[in-house]
Amino acid sequence: MEEPSKGKKKPRAVGQIIPKDDGKHLVRIFLGRDPQTGKREYFSKLINGKQKDAQIYLRKKLREIDLGTFVKPSVTTVSEYLDEWLKVAAQPRIAPNTFEQYTDILNRYVRPAIGSLKLSSVRTMNVQALYSSMQQRGLSARVVRYTHAVLNSAFKQAVKWSMLALNPAELVDLPKAERKEMQALTPEQAAKFLAAAATDRYGVLFNVAIVTGMRPSEYLGLQWKDTNFETGMVTVQRTLTWKRDGSWYFGEPKTSRSRRSIPLPASLVLLLKEHKRRQAEERLKAGPKYQNLDLVFASQEGKPLMQHNLIMRHFKPILKQAELPESIRLYDLRHTCATLLLVAEENPKVVSERLGHSSVVMTLDTYSHVLPSMQKAASEKLENLLYNNSGTPLAHQPSSIQLSKSVND
């Protein structure tokens, strides 16, 4: 096969319409030769209509070829494509736990609904019907939106790979995102909780959770090398993640901002020192059975803690002992840290850095329920600055803030 000379334009695709005995018309377009085999390649479509209908269809396809948006229909099904996408595109760039979530969401919701369809035949209405069906089954907006995020990403890649001309998930209507109800302990409740936790094996863990605002996966992945008793600092460098098969691994923090150093109050440093001493005694007692992973919070054999066991065997009993609502979740200790600091009028940027949020905007949006009380306090400060007890403006004071006159005055 001869190579085209430089500067020579690629010949335009040509097509023909072949009448059939049953009144139908076959549209046939020559696409060129296969670069591997040299065989001629054609695109064919049987039109159930008049020759005029076939001509309209032919012009449309030739136009797509000219614009570079034409995609040759494939026999690949959605399920077959998703297998390839997960293996080639998704798995290399996402965490193992996220990969499991992607696989589960596709197996549970997407494959049963549209998995048998040919990839090239999927339309926006198919995807919309999938999401509508999920809502009718009582699934939350969060689940539907997460499913969409995964499927949309897969179809985007199909467009890049020239397996789809357009992304059929791009123009769907999604259910409105639900704002998850957040709970946070009041200062009095937090004190009761920590008092009840004082006698628990992992009481120090719950102190760390409230004081630092770390995510559970972050403080469960803490190692002693991440703590510095001299400076009173603890550094988040990894997360602990459990897989569905019962195995675990250390992963990267959620975002680049999640990798952070957090100062600890002196009282908590003392608690951690005592906790380390008791842990050393356990290690000696366990002997060769102890799995030394340098974890700050570990089982009696040194193994990583499972979040579910921590909640059921320790967190829930502490809530009950402290007479606090059972609806409070382990993650709410992180919300408690943020809420207490914001109510205490700490700078939102400081709170954002402590939590490892990607930006202060995210912090203010997440904890917007705290802002009204902060605004009230701000109004009271303005009241004291500007007005006297009778409600009239204060007389001019020498120490009052002076506004410089503009050079244009």
Image (tube, rainbow, N blue to C red):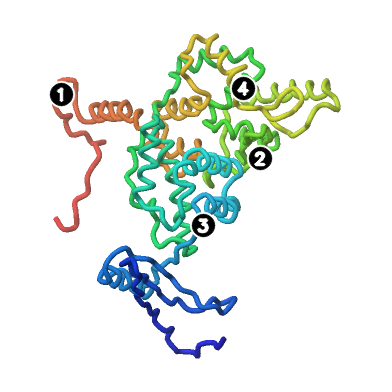
Q: Earlier in the sequence, mark 2 or mark 3?
A: 3
Q: Are marks 4 and 1 in contact (CB under 8 Å)?
A: no
In x, y percent, where is residue 78? 49, 51
Q: Earlier in the sequence, mark 3 or mark 1?
A: 3
Residue 349 is tagged as none
Distance from Cα at disc 4 to Cα at disc 1: 55 Å
Q: Are marks 3 and 1 in contact (CB under 8 Å)?
A: no
Q: Earlier in the sequence, mark 4 or mark 1?
A: 4
Badge 4 element:
helix
Badge 1 element:
loop
Left or right of 365 in this view: 31: right
User: What crowding class fits label 3: few (fewer than 14 Cα within 10 Å), some (14-19), or many (20 or more)?
Assistant: some
Badge 3 element:
loop
Q: Quadrant of residue 17?
A: bottom left
Q: Are marks 4 and 3 in contact (CB under 8 Å)?
A: no
Q: Quadrant of residue 372?
A: top left
- What residue sits right under mark 4 in the picture? 310
Report the residue at 41% width, 53% height from top.
Answer: 122
Up-down relation of residue 24 to residue 97 (above or below) = below
- What residue sits right under mark 2 in the picture? 250
- What residue sits right under mark 1 in the picture? 391
Report the residue at 18% width, 34% height from top.
Answer: 396
Report the residue at 58% width, 21% height from top.
Answer: 311
Q: Amino acid at mark 2?
A: Phe
